[in-house]
Every structure is written in C-alpha cells, then in structure tokens.
Image: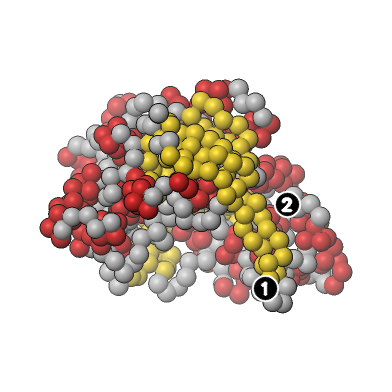
Amino acid sequence: MTLLSVENLSVIFETEQGIARAVDGINLFIEESETVGLVGESGCGKTVTGLSILRLIPNPPGRIEGGKIIFKDENLLNIPTQKFSHYRGKKIGMIFQDPTVSLNPVLSIKEHLVETVKLHKKVSGQSAINESVRLLEEAGISDAQKKLNSYPFQLSGGEKQRVMIALSLAGEPELLIADEPTTSLDVTIQAQILNSIDRIQKARGMAMLLITHDLGVISKRTKRSYVMYAGKIVEEAPTKELLSNPNHPYTKALINALPSRKRRGKKLENISGAVPAPIDFPKGCRFNPRCPIAIEKCKIEEPSLIEITSNHKTACHLCGSRNE
Amino acid sequence: MNNLLEVKNLCVTYPIFGGVLKKKIGEVRAVDKLSFEIKKGEAVGLVGESGSGKTTTALSCLGLIPMQGEIIWEGISIETMQIKMRKELSRRMQIVFQDPYSSLDPRMNVYDIVTEGLRAHRIGGREDRRKKAEELLDKVRLTKDSLDKYPHEFSGGQRQRIAIARALALEPKFIFLDEAVSSLDLLIQAQILNLLYELRAELNLTYLFITHDLSIVEYLCDRVIVMKGGKKEEEGNIEKIFDSPETEYTAKLLEARYAI
C-alpha cells in the first residue's frame, strides 16, 4: 500500500533576484516499509523536497506553490497548522544532515529527549526518562543512562547522529525522512549508523526516504530510487536497474564520474559546468547545456517523465525515441 | 636519490589545557613515531578515520606546527638546512586544503590570493606577476577575468581551482592534497580529479593525497599509507592493500565503504 505520495509538488522561494523554483512539479511515492532513495547534487532540490513533506519550508521566503502530499489518504497540505504536530515528528520523523548543528548546544541529551517523548507519548516524569534511555539504546548508544546527562559537545559526531535518530523515533513514525544522515561522518561510522537505521526499520516496519548524494549508499540501502536535477525528477527506477542500466544522460554522467580502480590511468568522464541556479533554469530540458547528446528539441521542449521499460521512468527526449 | 620526502619518527603532541587556570594538564599524541618515504613523481594516499593524524602529518611536514622527528627533503634533513634552503623548500612544498570556503581570504581578490606567495618570496615584478597569474588561471581552466573577482563570486569547484592555482604559483614539486575534493559534488569532484591528474603529468608533481574516500585513492594513487591513532597501520601498493589487507583495521575500513 502506498504510504506517501507526492503529486506535482512545486516549492518556490522569493528572492531578491527573482523567483527560485527549487522544486518544480515532482511526483514520488513510498510504499509501506519501503526504503526509497532520492539522489542528486547540491542545489537540486532534494532537501527542499524532504522539508516540504514536513511543511518545514521557511515562509517567507519559501512557499509550497502547488501540488499534493498525500500521507495515508490525507493531503498534508490541507491540515491546519495547529494539528500538524500530530504528523510532524509523530507519524513522519526526520533526521537532518548535520548533527552538530541540529542539536541545541545548551540543552542536555536528556532535555532533548524527554521534551520530545513527553510531547509525543503523553507520559511524564520517570517514565519519560526510561523511554528516553530505551530510545537511545535502540539507536545504538552504549551506556545510554550515562550519556543522557551529557551535552552535545561531549559526544562524537556518530553519537550525535544516533541521538538525532533516537529523537526522530520518539513519536514512532511510520515514515522516516533521512536527509544525508551520514554525510559528515567517517566511513566506518557511516556503516554503523546505516546498519542501526536498517535494524530499526526492520523491527518497526518503518518506511524511509533516504536523501543523499552518495550513489554507494543508495546502491546498498535502497530498492528503488529517484534522481533529481534542477528541481525535477529526471529518472526513477529500481536501484539496481538505475545503476547498471541508467537511461538519463545525467544519471550516466554521475555514475561515470565515480573514481575507481577500473578507471585508473584514464580520465574520468567529465561533464562541464555546474547545476544551474534555480532562478535561472535553462529552457527546455534543464540538463541540455551540459548534456553531451542534446539536440535542438532539448533546448525548446521540456521532456516529461515517461515509462521506458517497466518501472523505469526517464525524462529525456532521446531515451524515449530509442526504445520506440 | 629518488626519495623526494622522507619522514622519520615524526611525533606531534597537542597540549590539553584544563582546570581553572587553563594550565597544561596533559597532552595528546596526534602523530606517534610515523615514518614514511615518498618518491619523486609518486602519488601516495594517506587514509584513516578522523583523528588518526592525517592532517597533522601534512601540517608538520610543511613546518606549520611544531613537531619532533626528522624530515628529509631531497636527501637533506631540514634541521641542517640553511635559511636559504628552507625558503626554497617552502616554495616547493605546497598544500590544498579541504574546504575552499574557508581556505581563501574573502577580502582578497583572486589575483592577490594567487600571487601572495610570489610577493612573499619576492619573485618577479608587478607585470611578471600579472602574467604569471594569468598563466596559472589558465592551468586550472579558469578565465582571465576571474583575476579581479573575489572568492564569494565563485562556486565550490571554482574556488578549489583557485586554491590549486595558489599552490602551483611557486612551482612546487610536492603538493599535499588534504581532502581536496571531499566537499565537492560528484561531477565537480570528477572535474577537479581530472585536473589534478593532468597537472601531475604536465608539471611532474608528487602528491600526498589525504582522504577518507578509498575510491579516490584507488583511482589516483600508486601507493597507500593507512593511519590509525597517529601510527602507521599498514603501507603498500594499491593492489596489496585493497586486495589483501594485512591488518584488521584496514579490512574494516574497506568493508565499511559502499562502492558500486
């Protein structure tokens, strides 16, 4: 069953330079207890997508301009702000990218957790503390009782991220949005954290939207993935298929840019330029100025996301015609 | 003599201050009796977790922090070097830092940033420096008109190109690349890696590539040194370390990575 479905979502930011269309008409869905990846470079709109599901877009300057976010048959965008706290953190949890800035430095871990537990569980006193300890243990913190009294600066990066995970689990969410949960961590810690999340997910049957720029993480942790470029979803496929048989020239470029031993002594395939700024997206296909195979049509007409083989959708004029 | 750099028994300690008067109450050994050699023209990877002493090693070789031990450059120990030679050495050994957002002075324009080393070493006149700066930008594939701009006008990848141009200004033989591509997006990272690859061949450079990304080491380096807790854990060529690591720690590092 579909747990979350984002339909035609558009998010804009009003800036002094003009209107930035950070997310522009995207569709995505997540099944119950499914792990879905959302990949793309900085500035492609993946974090904004995550934030808008929880209605955390700062307004002004940001605004959800159109679309629906359906969570279990309910459009989250129509829920009154006061009632939204039943969803934010409770039914949908989120882990942010940088654990060093997402915890309050003047509050102890205990204060962080107890406040959250009290809010979601309607318990108080000792039982809130017990629950906090249990959550920390579930998130893989050893010596949880002792760590409860520490402050964020006394913890390592990995431990802080585990505290973030414990916080996001307090409301027993059915969906977890993990925005680059391991980007600032060492590889060994990254593996530990992702293993912990995986274990919790299995135990709770929780779904996850894993937002990352790391194709390696996507390949090991997700069944299905979306690739985002300049506010649009350009490709959607089962992860294995996506990585072994990419259709979109952008996805291909990402995969070919990965350094590895196979490519030793050769130059990496290289796409010039950078992601365009969201106030000034190019006409037609947004990838066309950097695309090695762009034709005239790409500069005029914007391609839509169409199914090319079963479950594999691509937004590219040239991929559709190849299979026709 | 084909060892460009030799490091023998390098030790670096950082003091720990504590108590009411902030007196020294102890010390951390960031690098502990580390020895290694780097041959001319080699690209060597230095890997390990955060806090294993990778950056400290680079900084102490560059003479930026106090250290104990012996550093031998082209067969001559730096302790026995005359001031003139030390100056020469400081030209030939350069570094590119991790974060191009904090490693470039926001109040200096690109021309000043790139030619600061030339001015410090009193190389060339004003005209020569301008010409040199233009050449350098050309080397890192930036346009001439960038010279009068300030760092905030550039993207992360472009800033890292400026940082590389600055490192190249004094015609170095050896460059420390301290996580030089870690903060960049994948496609930009590929552009910079290609640039480093080309420059190495073009200018006959030697690299010490400090990184936590083992795929980059596999791609770019000939040899790898694994560090743990300030000590050398293992050392060898790429095939040896990646295919049959001898220590548990290296095996753990390799196992933890997610390669496609």
Above/below status of A214 relative to A170: above
Above/below status of A14 relative to A310: below
Toward the left, the furthest residue is B127
Please, which chain is the residue tagged with disc 1 on?
Answer: B
Taking the spot 82% from the left edge, 66% from the top edge, the residue there is A129
Q: Residue B81, can we see it? A: yes
Residue at mark 2? A139
| Rendered location of residue B235, percent (x, y) | 56, 30
Residue at mark 1? B22
Q: In this view, does A315 lie to the left or right of A2?
A: left
| Rendered location of residue B140, percent (x, y) | 26, 45
Please, which chain is the residue tagged with disc 2 on?
Answer: A
Taking the spot 26% from the left edge, 39% from the top edge, the residue there is A291
Q: Is residue B233 left or right of residue B143?
A: right
| Rendered location of residue A146, percent (x, y) | 81, 61
Q: Which amino acid does label 1 sit on?
A: Lys
Q: Which of A265 and A280 is in front in this view?
A: A265
| Rendered location of residue A162, percent (x, y) | 68, 54
Q: Which of A149 and A253 is in front in this view?
A: A149
Say what secondary structure mark 1 lies in.
loop
Taking the spot 85% from the left edge, 72% from the top edge, the residue there is A125
Q: Which amino acid does label 2 sit on?
A: Ala
